[in-house]
Image (spheres, grey):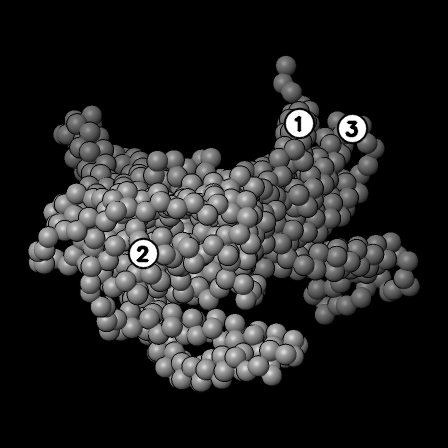
Amino acid sequence: MLFDANLLFAILLGIEGLVYLILILQALRHRTGQEEAASLLGLYALAALALTVFEALWRLNLIPLTGSLVWRFQVYGLFFLAVLMVLVNRAFLRLPGRSAWLGGGTLVFVLSALFSGGVLPLPEILWSNGRYQLPSARLGFLILLLGWIVFFAAALLVTRAVFRRTRQPLHRNRISYWLPILSLLAANDILLLSGRSGWGGLLRLLAVWLMTYMLTKHRLADARRIFRGAILYLLGIGLLVGAYVAGYTLFGLLPGFLPDVDPFLLGLVITAFLALISFSLFGLLRPLVYRLLPVESYNPSQTLRDYSISISNILDVERLATVAVGLIIEAMDIRRGFLFLVDKDTDLHGRVTYRLRAVRGAGERPLRVGVLSAAGPFARFFAQGHRPLLQYDVDMLPEFRQGPASEREWLSSLDTEVYVPIFAKKEWIGMLALGAKSSGNRYTDDDLNVLTTLANQTAVALENARLVENLIRLNQEIRQAYQALDRANRNLERLDQTKSDFISIASHELRTPLTVLRGYTEMLLEDPAIKENRYHYQTIEGIHKGTLRLHEIMDSMFDIAQIDARTLELSWQAVDVPELIRSVSSGMAAALKERNQTLTLDLPALPAIKADPKTLRKVFQHLLSNAIKFTPNGGRITILGRALTPNQRDLPEGGVEIVVADTGVGVAPEYHDLIFTKFYQPEEDLNKHSTGKTKFKGSGAGLGLALSRGIVEAHGGRIWVESPGYDEVTCPGSQFHVVLPLRRQGESETVRISEGARLKL
């Protein structure tokens, strides 16, 4: 039993309807950043499905309408679909003005309905030239047809304009799909408008499928390759068909001219001859197609080998960038490329960021430093995937489009198409940014795999180059630090010299007026008339004590100036050290009694030394004075000594060691050397002033220990302090050691032994 033609068409239309339903669901479920375009495409497919269902029901005689009414309904449907197609096109291209086009389509509908429905009082014939005429009933159809032409032309022109100003091949490839889509829709509508709607819009179904594929797939097949393959396929089919027709024709004509030839052999010769000609023509035409639609080709193995050899021994970052990027550009025919160094950093809010700074060769334009947040989509993509990122992905995928605007703007400013991260030991250390290919072709998956391999090879060379760069920078910083240290030392030397000059000048200039002042005050103190007036006597006595204090300070400053200038003159003579220290200790009896302190002097019999007794007395006066000053009331001070045997280092003939120990507040280890510098005072004592020489922690001029060291070293000896630390509660105490040689090196005399000294105050 034969099927009715309408029933067969209805079945085909039903299958089309199912396909439309699948495409609608597909468009609404997978949007890939084209939400509005996908929604409009779903509406377009739904309207096409309605037209398909309507035609199927009409062919099954379920809708009692005449053919002219059905045709008119389809015409209105075609125009509605044309309006939706323009909206989908503009939404896909992210162009404004969709409301205006929707309004224009509505206006065309209204005008067509008014003229077709006879609402307006128009004559039956609007125009006629005797041969052709325009009935008013056809005016509505002409308005729809004109609107259909305008909408299709607008979609085609807008798509062409956007395609021409788009630079990135992947975006151009995506836009190029509109050419077959618009061609299929136009062909379908022309067939339907001309009355050839027998196959129910199969071309439209194919166009909707292409639009769904274009909107729901992120990576589209290369349209240029497809088009080239289609041309080659059609060219091959055409040559085979031409060869078949030519062979069939020759096979029918030649037997009449060659009656004695075997027909089978003749056909075999004709077939072989025509096959040879067709294959030769195909071989000649294929290079022409390749030139019209070029696809670059390179040898990945050779590229990887040359790249590895060229960069393996490069330790300079700039040269590495020049060579590496240059090789990639040359191998893949790329327009531009950059190598970025990636430094991990932390911003002011404690967030981890990556700073990308371009390695710029000579003559290249400077590039802004990029900052990518470690929590952002771009750095996270590189860190997790270790794979290239396309600018196309940045523009299309929602997770990147919703990323920080500053990061997207920086990537776009590079005018590149692919970003290849470079990792070493799981740390992101660099990035290759490569521009478009000169051929205009896209980056294929094979290209991205090759670039990933090249980035892995670059990692070792880049890490080595960065280590060398860091070493060079560190050496430069060390040199700069040394230079700064030298400048600081010179400044300190100048400052120290200035201080020494001041001390020398001040001590010389003040000694004379202080001597005069001291003499007059002593004369006044001896005047009987002054002694009778208690108030005047105490006043002059205070002035006299202050004068003595100033005179003592001036003497110390004068000695310091001589020590700095190395002009301190010593009067060398035999000195009985125990007796000298006993004399100094006895002079401290009043201060010890005032502070309720105990002084124990226990010196054994020591050899006499060759020294200056006057300056040596000052050393022990300062040491005892400091011991009294920094020991709390009721504390203990002990002076011990011992003879030292000769040694080859600093005591070739032996010497003596004196230790002044106390139970005071102690000295912090970091200040053991600092306290022997001129004018040193603890920070907490800088703003304290005391005229008392032995008041607890009373501040002085800061010259005593410096003077002591200078005198001891002028004698060829050493002085130092030992103390566990500073503590005003536990009072760990201090021990000041003074080592003095028996005599200056080279002298040789009989050594006199003292009787020792013992004293308790």
Looking at marks 1 and 2 on the same chain, the residue that comes earlier in the sequence is marked by 1
The quadrant in which residue 66 appears is top right
- SS of the residue under disc 1: helix
Q: Residue at x 64, y 29 (%)?
A: 22
Mark earlier in primary sequence (3, 2): 3
Disc 3 vs disc 2: which is toward the camera? 2
Among the two numbered marks 1 and 3 on one chain, the one whose residue lies closer to the N terminus: 1
Residue occupying the point 27% across, 59% down:
712
Residue 61: assigned label: 3
* Secondary structure type for disc 3: loop
Q: Position of residue 487 (x, y in %)?
A: 32, 69
Q: Which mark is residue 714?
A: none
Three-letter amino acid code of the residue under disc 2: Leu
Marks 3 and 2, how far apart at CA: 141 Å
- Seen in the picture, residue 379 relative to 337 is either above or below; the reply is above
Q: In the depicted view, which residue is nearer to us: 573 or 156?
A: 573
- Residue 471 is situated, as x and y percent measured from the top left of the image, at 27, 52
523 above or below 413? below
Q: Residue at x 65, y 75 (%)?
A: 534
Classify mark 2: helix, strand or loop: helix
Q: For mark 1, what is the residue?
A: 18
Q: Position of residue 168 (x, y in %)?
A: 46, 54
| Residue at mark 1 to residue at mark 2: CA–CA distance | 122 Å
Pointer 1 and pointer 3: residues touching (CB < 8 Å)?
no
Using a 10 Å C-alpha cutoff, classify the residue at mark 3 as few (fewer than 14 neighbours), some (14 to 19) or many (20 or more): few
Q: Tell me the kind of residue under disc 3.
A: Asn
Quarter of the rendering containing residue 209: top right
- Between 433 and 613, which is closer to the camera in this rendering? 613
Residue 580: numbered disc: 2
